[in-house]
Every structure is written in C-alpha cells, then in structure tokens.
C-alpha cells in the first residue's frame, strides 16, 4: 500500500507514511493494461486495487481529515503486510491508497476527483465533508466511479435512486439529532433549548432530526435559534443572543473545530453554562473539549458508535490495542487519536475488505453489488449495539448510535439526561 501526494495542498504528517506503506504493500501492477484483464475496471489488476481519498489535509479541518487517511492506511497496511485480501474472484490483492488534499474546498475536491480518474483510481472512499463530497457526486455518477463509505451524514449519499454509485458511512445527521432529542424528552424535567446550526444541509439535518424527536414533548421548548456560515470565524454574536434566552440546553450543530472550541470558551465568558449537545465529528475530548474548558458545564453530550481509545474503559480492549499499534506502524499516527475519524476510517477499511471478499468479478459493478449486501458486520472498534448494515436504502453503513456523556476524560454511555 502507498499514500501519494497529489495537487491541492500539502500532506504534512501523512506524506511520511508513503515510504513505509509502499514498502509493505509490494504493489506492482499486474494483469494487462490499466486493469486486471480485458473486462476489469480501471484501478484493479490481478495483484492490486487502488483507492482514492480526497479529504482536508490542510486548513481548519486538517485534524479529522488526516485521520480519514490514517485509519484506512493503518487497516490495509496490516492487511497488506499479512499478504493482502483474497477477493471473491479467487485472486489475492494488496490495497494502494492515494490521498489528495482538498482543504475542505469543494472546487479542490472536484479537481481531486478528476485527478483520481486520470490516476486510474478504482473507487473514492472515506473523504470528509458534505460540501466536498457533494462537489464531485454528479461527476462520479456520470463516470460510474464508486464514491463510497464517505464521512458525511448527508442522506443524499445513501439514497440509491439519486446516488447509485454512492454510500455514506457515518449515521445521517437526522439520526444523531434524533438520538439526543429522544434522550432529552425522556427526562422528567422541563428544559429550554437554544439551537445554533451551520447554515447548510449539515446543520439543517441535525436540527430536523432533533425537532422531529421532541415533537409533542410537553417538557421541551425551543426558545432561541441562530445560524452561522461554515466560513465564519466567530459566532460570538449568536452565542450572546442565545444566552439571553435563558436556555439550559444548547444544541450546537457545528462542524468546524476552531469554532466549537471558541464557542465553549465564549459561553463561559458570558456566564452561560447550559448542557451541550455536540455532533460526533466535533466532540473530541482532547482536541475540542479540553481546550474549550468543557468540564465547566453540567453536561456535554454526543453520540458514538466507536470505542474511544482514550477512555479508561477501553484501555485494554483487544480491538483498541491492535488499532493503536497499527495506526502507529502503518498510519504514521503515533499519538492517541484526537478525532473519532481515525476509528471510523479504520472501520471503513474493514467494510471495504468485506466487500472485496465478496466481489466475484474485478469490476466496479461487482464491487457495488458486494458492498450493498453487508449486514450485521461487527467491524473492529464498534460499540456493542451497533453494526455495519449496507442493505437499507436511505441509510448509510452505520445507522445506529449510542448517546454518551463526557466524564472529564472521555465518554460513558448516557442512560438518562442529567
């Protein structure tokens, strides 16, 4: 397996992995032409398959973006070192990863996809972001290139009619918002909720799921709503207005790491200390909650489907021990993961491997058929009660989540609100 730099930015820490990973993969092109035979799709030979990831490796979202490459690299680095994947057609192949920096810029993401096509990438996978994945969705459909297990909760990517060559990985935004709404309505106390959301499909999805879940609940009232743009550098004005509402619960559908940290800090500065809900992708204990001073609040809630390596409860878990070892050795990520995307993309690797094992032909059509028929897969690092199911139209590979509460170090399952 190898990770190579492509136009669009600097790979930074990920670039170093290319030297080590390449030596492990033994990825030489076999077969004839660009495929493994006359009937093979681009990007697959008799001995290897090439995957592409366009994701932010620079800019404000570089932290989670780097994780989307590191996790997949760790998974397939170990698989390659053990000999590769035995595909459903009987051939054993190693997996090559090509990463492309889009800096969370849709135009760069589209350009990266076009470069992938030129590079004969078999499928695009694991990339972070709704606007960036949307930027090349239509092109992927037009050129029949799989764009799968991507890190966006946009339900469009899991609608088979509208997106025949796509599939999301993480739960759709509505599912996450609804999970928190259900926890809140189960509380016996009265709660006033203030909402701040990103002014795009990301924010709207979270809010719609939350509102649907609290509909008809006599103990919940929404007392203030504000939005912000993903390009904003401050939301101080919105926070000040929401604080004046007297809300004791803050539903913050925010995707930008620096803004989440500054929001946690600003609310404290103005003396507003509600309980918070944060989306799974902006709830990292070490990268967001600790610098934001989250322990000052009565409760920080989020949702998860992955074991958190930093949690004492999973410190000796066999999945976690193996993951951290492989992340360091093959993903060039020696530190404790600061973002859940490292774990998610590792699971993406396991899901892809399952699809590869069921591919009966070296074609993209065969791959999509195999990918859409995975049910009940307990991928490494998945929490009990969650699993991979790609068979439900309209739902991503992971549709179930567990609501958790921050305990000062990591998260523990929230049995109730409060």
Image (cartoon, rainbow, N blue to C red):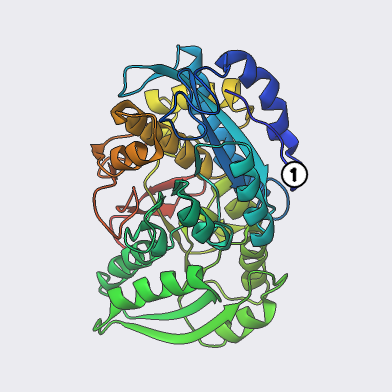
> Residue 287: x percent and y percent?
62, 48
The answer to which image quadrant residue 265 occupies is bottom right
The answer to which image quadrant residue 268 occupies is bottom right
Above or below, comparing residue 93 to residue 366 in the picture: above
Q: Mark 1 points at which residue?
A: 7
Is residue 130 toward the left or the right of residue 264 in the image? Answer: left
Q: Is residue 373 visible?
A: yes
> Residue 387: x percent and y percent?
28, 42
Above or below, comparing residue 290 to residue 373 in the picture: below
Q: What element carries label 1?
A: loop
Q: Can residue 252 be seen in this view?
A: no
Residue at screen point 73% across, 70% down: 233
Q: Which of 288 and 347 is in front in this view?
A: 347
Residue at screen point 48% across, 45% down: 410
The answer to which image quadrant residue 380 occupies is top left
Residue at screen point 52% across, 17% down: 30
The image quadrant where one finds the N terminus is: top right
The image quadrant where one finds the C terminus is: bottom left
């Amino acid at each position: 397996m190898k990770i190579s730099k492509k136009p669009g930015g600097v790979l930074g820490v990920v670039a170093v992995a290319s030297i080590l990973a390449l030596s492990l993969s033994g990825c030489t092109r076999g077969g004839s032409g660009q495929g493994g035979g006359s009937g093979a799709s681009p990007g697959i030979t008799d001995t290897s398959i090439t995957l592409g990831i366009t994701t932010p490796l620079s800019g404000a979202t570089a932290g989670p973006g780097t994780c989307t490459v590191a996790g997949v690299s760790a998974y397939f680095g170990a698989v390659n070192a053990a000999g590769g994947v035995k595909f459903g057609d009987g051939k054993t192949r190693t997996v090559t990863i090509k990463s492309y920096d889009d800096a969370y810029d849709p135009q760069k993401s589209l350009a990266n996809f076009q470069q992938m096509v030129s590079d004969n990438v078999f499928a695009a996978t694991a990339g972070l972001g709704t606007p960036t994945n949307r930027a090349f969705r239509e092109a992927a459909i037009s050129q029949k290139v799989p764009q799968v297990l991507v890190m966006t909760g946009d339900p469009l990517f899991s609608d088979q009619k509208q997106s025949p060559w796509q599939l999301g990985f993480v739960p759709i935004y509505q599912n996450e918002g609804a999970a928190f709404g259900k926890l809140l309505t189960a509380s016996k106390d009265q709660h006033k909720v203030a909402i701040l959301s990103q002014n795009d499909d990301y924010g709207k999805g979270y809010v719609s799921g939350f509102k649907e879940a609290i509909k008809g609940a006599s103990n919940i009232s929404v007392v203030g709503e504000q939005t912000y743009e993903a390009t904003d550098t401050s939301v101080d004005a919105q926070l000040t207005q929401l604080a004046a509402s007297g809300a004791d619960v803050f539903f913050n559908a925010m995707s930008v790491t620096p803004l989440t940290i500054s929001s946690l800090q600003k609310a404290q500065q103005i003396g507003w200390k509600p309980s918070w809900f944060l989306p799974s992708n902006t709830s990292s204990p070490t990268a967001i909650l600790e610098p934001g001073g989250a322990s000052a609040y009565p409760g920080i809630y989020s949702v998860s489907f992955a074991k958190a390596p930093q949690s004492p409860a999973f410190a000796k878990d066999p999945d976690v021990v193996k993951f951290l070892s492989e992340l360091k050795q093959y993903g060039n990520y020696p530190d404790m993961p600061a973002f859940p995307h490292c774990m998610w993309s590792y699971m993406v690797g396991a899901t892809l491997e399952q699809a590869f094992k069921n591919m009966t032909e070296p074609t993209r059509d065969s791959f999509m058929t195999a990918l859409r028929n995975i049910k009940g897969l307990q991928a490494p690092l998945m929490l009990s009660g969650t699993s991979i199911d790609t068979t439900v139209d309209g739902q991503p590979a992971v549709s179930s989540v567990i609501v958790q509460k921050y305990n000062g170090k990591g998260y523990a399952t929230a049995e109730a609100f409060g």
